[in-house]
Amino acid sequence: MMSLVNRKAPSFSAAAIVNGEIVGDFSMEQFFGKKYVVLFFYPKDFTFVCPTEIWAFQERLPDFEKRNVQLVGCSTDSEFAHFAWLEIPRERGGIKGISFPLVADINKTIAYDYGVASGLCDEDGCEREIVVGEVVAYRGLFLIDREGIIQHCVINNMPLGRSVDETLRMVDALQHFEKFGEVCPANWHRGQKAMRPTRDGLREFFE
């Protein structure tokens, strides 16, 4: 599948849990022009690695808010499964207290459009019509700028949890480039020297 980086984020309108309420027509487009969006997919509610990721994002929510970033989670569960999981305390394996939106992709169309749907590959390649096993979402994450353009994505297989620190680093790199026009080298962190994309800028970086 062609990469979505530097392309418009696929639009959708779906049921979601927002501020503890079921919303029937949640869309990320409400944030475009105002906020950055980190959209992350996870395989299933009531599982093992997924709540560790969801809580890790929640614990760093103030850091995302300081950067004007809206977090949005999404899985192929129903809004009713999301709601039930949000009613269960953390110490019992639930996610009660999570405050960012959780989208219900029960028809799998969002996962297909973002290229994170599992169970679709066979020896002849990947086709939407060919399903091998249950279709859920891989651990995909997409950083979307204020114009609705995807600037970064990462897709992990189900056993591999993501790094929230790396997500924040990517937000910082994008915002640094937007503000200063400087590109960010390997392992760059906010406050470190970046590079101007010119011969002189490269020389200055290494001096």
Image (tube, grey):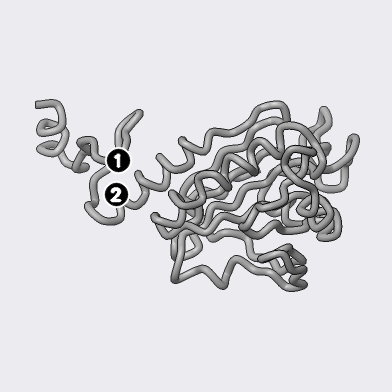
Look at discs 1 and 2 and give the one toward the viewer.
Answer: 1
Q: Mark 1 Cα within 10 Å, few/some/many (few <14, many 20+)?
A: some
Residue at the spot of label 1: 190
Q: Residue at x 85, y 59 (%)?
A: 80
State the mark number for residue 176: 2
Compared across the picture, whether 105 is left or right of 60 comes to: right
Classify the position of the N terminus by image quarter: top right
Q: Residue at x 30, y 55 (%)?
A: 178
The amino acid marked with disc number 1 is Arg
Q: Residue at x 46, y 36 (%)?
A: 165
Quick one: SS at disc 1? loop
Q: CA–CA distance between discs 1 and 2?
A: 8 Å
Q: Mark 2 Cα within 10 Å, few/some/many (few <14, many 20+)?
A: some
Tell me: residue 169, above or below residue 31.
above
The amino acid marked with disc number 2 is His
Say which quarter of the image contains residue 65.
bottom left
Tell me: residue 193, above or below residue 23.
above
In percent of width and height, residue 116 lies at: 70, 43
Classify the position of the C terminus by image quarter: top left
In percent of width and height, residue 4 lies at: 56, 49
Pointers 1 and 2 in contact (C-beta within 8 Å): yes
Tell me: residue 4, above or below residue 92.
below
Tell me: residue 69, above or below residue 45.
below
Q: How many marks?
A: 2
